[in-house]
Image (tube, coloured by chain):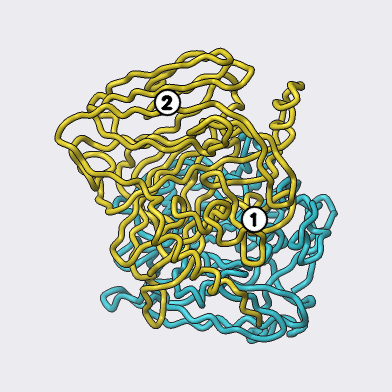
Chain colours: A cyan, B yellow
């Protein structure tokens, strides 16, 4: 997908992504019609998964299922396993561990991931026959939740969104080391204002319900997420349950870390979630993205 | 679809890794020993992947050479470190072993060593100091970025397979020492010019080297390529659990990402983690951050059909660090994980 994203200040940048043509998104021409982030892949623990990637024309791309650990032939790392260009490659892997992952292009990654070539990857546990139908758990034997939020938090440097797909790969300084993000987003929505109320990002729940936040640090710089004064219980990270759950009010995460957090508000109200984006050298806060948990 | 020549080149890496002995080698002793080592503070230039020559300094094994990082030391609690440091440069330097925890004072220091002078450390390691340490020059805040750094591993007394007494066990161990290089800083030091007030790294190294992918000059050469250096490459068969002592000598924080297996996260900045988490990303802080983890060398769990062999990368997920000179993706801080 070669599309764009419009920010709250009216500016836009080019966005690349993966389109799910089987679900009716776009055409197999690498042009518009997709979503940002790319559509989530959602499978069940134990399934054998085929992810078919078709790359039209001369571009090179891959899909790396981040946190999934398949054979090297299915790992989707440009140069090291396979680059996909002018055809289709089908990745085969087994969903061994329930949890939160994501997928992204692993070709010229400082550019292609920055351009938006990523999406969530969720592995649900096998249904427990002893649970009532429709019960949702974070992992087998893990906590039950009623409401789910997937927050893929990312920063965007507009200067990089003007480059062509192979920029820098044959040498030359195109600034891939020098990252200056200006926009800070949550799951493809500007975190300046829009994410405060965006459907699917802002959470609406009732008192007594349990929320599972699947937090994905989808940018390159470290991030610090706080939950508006709510206590979050980290139950798993990077697709693996923790030996014992940990209660926190904030998490500082590095690029591509994932944290699954259970939140059980004890009072009604509106809680503003903040994600600060931190410079990798100075630690300075470069920007903040915000959304809300509304408890009625 | 295009398959690159990596596999053929990877075969060369296997041969060199098997022949090499880059891993930290350790046999526990019942008696304490004196560990003697001499370093020379030297300078020189190295050519970066984009052809740019950059000035460096190092704790070298001999005069007239650069050794980045300085040769690592492994010892055990109760041993006495006898370290001699000869300053061959024109400015004052020192050699400091950072404390185990960020709040700890340095483990030991030579104090300032004037140009042409020799510094000395004689330090007997008390019980309770097992762990991973960075030694470096802290006369300035930036000398370690220039290459003046290295790793010290202190084993628990009498143990061969534990990071600290009672830790999960391993069978092999190595250092991953990361650095970030802003050539403007290095050049300013070389020219005795005003030091920049902010840094923008353009090169990113692991154990002093960048990766050099297939097709690049030096690919497969363990003296140049971090993906072929047996001191850096993770190589093993199923069950060859390997302790990775990660030290951050550089200016930036990093997200250390292993493919093929999650790592067992044992320590953060010297402190034992309350429980061992399994992570595919570890947050390596800047300002002397460090992490100990075990790469378990288990069969890649999501492989179908199952497999026990293959080549995979370890790279930093802050992807700016995977470049050189503002471009050249795959010429950054990356190495190889080889299941044999």
Image position, residue A281 (x, y; %): 62, 36
Where disc 2 sits, the SS reads strand
Judged from the image, the secondary structure of the residue bearing numbered disc 1 is: loop
Q: Position of residue B318 (x, y in %)?
A: 60, 51
In this rendered view, identify the residue nearer to me: A35 or B304. Answer: B304
Q: Which mark is residue B97?
A: 2
Q: Find residue A243 and report its horizontal and vertical position in percent.
A: 29, 53
Splitting the image into 4 quarters, where does residue B58 fall?
A: top right
Residue A140: image location, x then y, percent: 32, 68
- The chain that hosts pointer 1 is B
Q: Would you place residue A165 above or below residue A244 in this image?
A: below
Question: Can residue B272 be seen from the camera position used here?
Answer: yes
Measuring 40% from the left and 68% from the top, which residue is drawn there?
B339
Asked if residue A94 lies left or right of residue B9, the reply is left
Give the Cα separation between the discs numbered 1 and 2: 30 Å
Q: Earlier in the sequence, mark 1 or mark 2?
A: 2
From this viewpoint, which residue is outermost toward the left?
A: B30
Return the mark for residue B331: 1
Q: Residue at x 44, y 32 (%)?
A: B134
């Amino acid at each position: 997908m070669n599309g764009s994203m419009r920010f709250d200040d009216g500016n836009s940048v080019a966005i690349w992504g993966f389109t799910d043509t089987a679900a009716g998104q776009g055409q197999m021409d690498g042009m518009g019609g997709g979503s940002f982030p790319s559509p989530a892949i959602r499978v069940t623990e134990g399934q054998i998964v085929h992810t078919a990637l078709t790359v039209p024309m001369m571009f090179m791309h891959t899909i790396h299922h981040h946190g999934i650990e398949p054979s090297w032939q299915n790992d989707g790392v440009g140069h090291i396993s396979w680059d996909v260009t002018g055809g289709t490659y089908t990745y085969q892997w087994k969903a061994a561990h329930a949890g939160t992952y994501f997928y992204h292009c692993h070709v010229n990654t400082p550019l292609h991931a920055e351009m938006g070539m990523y999406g969530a990857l969720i592995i649900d546990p096998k249904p427990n026959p002893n649970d009532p139908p429709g019960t949702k758990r974070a992992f087998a034997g893990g906590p039950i939740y009623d409401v789910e939020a997937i927050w893929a938090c990312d920063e965007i440097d507009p200067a990089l969104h003007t480059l062509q797909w192979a920029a820098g790969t044959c040498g030359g300084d195109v600034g891939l080391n020098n990252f200056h993000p200006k926009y800070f987003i949550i799951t493809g929505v500007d975190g300046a204002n829009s994410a405060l109320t965006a459907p699917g990002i802002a959470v609406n729940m009732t008192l007594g319900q349990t929320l599972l936040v699947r937090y994905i640090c989808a940018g390159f710089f470290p991030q610090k997420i706080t939950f508006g004064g709510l206590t979050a219980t980290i139950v798993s990270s990077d697709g693996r349950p923790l030996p014992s759950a940990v209660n926190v009010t904030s998490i500082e995460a590095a690029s591509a870390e994932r944290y699954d957090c259970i939140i059980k508000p004890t009072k009604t109200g509106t809680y503003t979630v903040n994600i600060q984006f931190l410079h990798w050298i100075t630690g300075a806060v470069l920007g903040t993205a915000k959304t809300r948990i509304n408890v009625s | 679809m295009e398959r690159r020549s990596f596999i053929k080149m990877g075969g060369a890496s296997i041969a060199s890794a098997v022949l090499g002995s880059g891993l930290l080698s350790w046999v526990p002793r019942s008696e304490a020993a004196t560990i003697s080592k001499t370093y020379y503070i030297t300078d020189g230039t190295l050519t970066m992947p984009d052809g740019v020559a950059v000035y460096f300094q190092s704790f070298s094994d001999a005069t007239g050479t650069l050794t980045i990082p300085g040769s690592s030391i492994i010892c055990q609690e109760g041993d006495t470190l006898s370290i001699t440091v000869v300053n061959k440069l024109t400015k004052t330097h020192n050699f400091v072993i950072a404390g185990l925890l960020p709040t700890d004072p340095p483990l030991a220091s030579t104090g300032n060593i004037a140009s042409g002078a020799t510094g000395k450390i004689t330090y007997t390691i008390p019980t309770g100091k097992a762990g991973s340490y960075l030694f470096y020059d802290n006369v300035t805040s930036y000398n370690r970025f220039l290459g003046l750094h290295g790793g010290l591993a202190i084993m628990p007394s009498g143990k061969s397979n534990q990071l600290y007494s009672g830790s999960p066990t391993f069978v092999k161990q190595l250092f991953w020492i990361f650095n970030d290089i802003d050539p403007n800083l290095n050049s300013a030091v070389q020219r005795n010019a005003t030091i920049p007030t902010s840094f923008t790294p353009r090169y990113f190294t692991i154990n002093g080297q960048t990766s050099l992918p297939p097709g690049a000059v030096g690919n497969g050469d363990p003296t140049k390529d971090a993906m072929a250096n047996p001191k850096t490459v993770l190589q093993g068969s199923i069950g060859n659990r390997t302790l990775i002592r990660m030290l951050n000598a550089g200016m930036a924080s990093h997200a250390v990402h292993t493919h093929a297996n999650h790592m067992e996260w044992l320590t953060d900045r010297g402190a034992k983690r309350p429980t061992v988490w399994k992570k595919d990303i570890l947050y390596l802080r800047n300002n002397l951050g460090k992490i100990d983890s075990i790469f378990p060398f288990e069969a890649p769990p999501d492989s179908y059909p199952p497999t026990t062999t293959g080549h995979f990368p370890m790279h930093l997920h802050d992807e700016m660090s995977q470049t050189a000179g503002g471009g050249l993706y795959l010429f950054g801080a990356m190495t190889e994980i080889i299941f044999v």
